[in-house]
Image (spheres, rainbow, N blue to C red):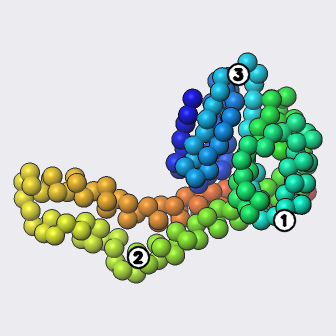
């Protein structure tokens, strides 16, 4: 079975989404990062998946990183040593054993890296949003590029309006990505602060 998750801004939600399929008796056999695609295979064992966010690593550090989790039964699905998300999967052994991080400091570091990942992900979209905002493209008159749209009447107006609406909404894509990333970063910061106060 193949599934695609195009809106992968929120790593925690993506992890929940993937584990929803695994709880139905599947395991992930392939992850395609460039199109957010996942290939699932039916299995008799319960599996769990975790997503870790890491900064760029040298080759030796990357191999050590993988080896450390593989020693605890995790299998590496996909990721890049140049930074970003790393997908891990293993046969479920219970709540405690199904976590990537066993101590509070590691969990704090995870939420800190998640904050950084979401902010870095949002940065190019923020720049594009500023350019779009500066050009005044977000006003209704400028979002719809069909000439004379607002002067049309009747069914001609509705046909042109409905045709142009998807393209107008695409102009909102960058600001929406920035908002989504900011929400993810704030939620990661909240979890990080909560763990810091428990010390």
Q: Residues within 10 Å of mark 2 (few under 14, many from 20)?
A: few
Residue under label 2: 133
Q: Is residue 28 above or below residue 175?
A: above
Using the numbered discs, state the Cα–Cα distance from disc 1 to disc 2 in whole angstroms.
Answer: 39 Å
Q: Is residue 14 above or below residue 166?
A: above
Task: State which quadrant residue 56 falls in.
Answer: bottom right
Q: Residues within 10 Å of mark 3 (few under 14, many from 20)?
A: few
**Label 1: element kind:** loop
Any mark on residue 125, and which? none
Residue under label 1: 58
**Label 2: element kind:** helix
Using the numbered discs, state the Cα–Cα distance from disc 2 to disc 3 in whole angstroms.
Answer: 49 Å
Q: Residues within 10 Å of mark 1 (few under 14, many from 20)?
A: few
Residue under label 3: 43
Task: State which quadrant residue 171 falls in.
Answer: bottom left
Q: Is 41 displayed left or right of 138 in the figure?
A: right
Q: Position of residue 188 (x, y in %)?
A: 70, 57
In-front residue for pair 37/53: 37
Q: Is residue 13 above or below residue 164?
A: above
Task: State which quadrant residue 93 falls in.
Answer: top right
Mark 3 or mark 1, which is nearer to you? 1
Mark 1 or mark 2, which is nearer to you? 1
Q: Is 152 displayed left or right of 42 in the figure?
A: left
Return the disc, 1 or 2, that comes first in the chain's sequence: 1
Q: Position of residue 119 (x, y in %)?
A: 64, 67
């Amino acid at each position: 079975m193949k599934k695609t998750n195009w809106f992968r801004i929120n790593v925690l939600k993506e992890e929940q989404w993937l584990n929803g399929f695994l709880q139905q008796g599947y395991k992930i056999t392939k992850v395609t990062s460039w199109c957010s695609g996942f290939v699932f295979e039916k299995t008799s064992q319960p599996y769990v998946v975790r997503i870790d966010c890491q900064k760029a690593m040298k080759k030796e550090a990357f191999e050590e990183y993988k080896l450390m989790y593989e020693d605890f039964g995790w299998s590496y699905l996909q990721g890049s040593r140049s930074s970003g998300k790393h997908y891990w999967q293993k046969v479920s052994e219970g709540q405690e054993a199904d976590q990537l991080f066993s101590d509070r400091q590691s969990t704090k570091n995870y939420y800190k890296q998640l904050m950084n990942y979401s902010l870095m992900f949002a940065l190019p979209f923020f720049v594009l949003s500023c350019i779009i905002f500066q050009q005044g493209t977000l006003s209704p008159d400028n979002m719809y590029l069909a000439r004379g749209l607002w002067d049309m009447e009747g069914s001609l107006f509705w046909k042109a309006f409905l045709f142009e609406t998807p393209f107008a909404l695409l102009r909102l894509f960058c600001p929406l990505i920035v908002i989504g990333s900011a929400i993810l970063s704030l939620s990661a910061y909240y979890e990080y602060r909560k763990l810091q106060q428990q010390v």
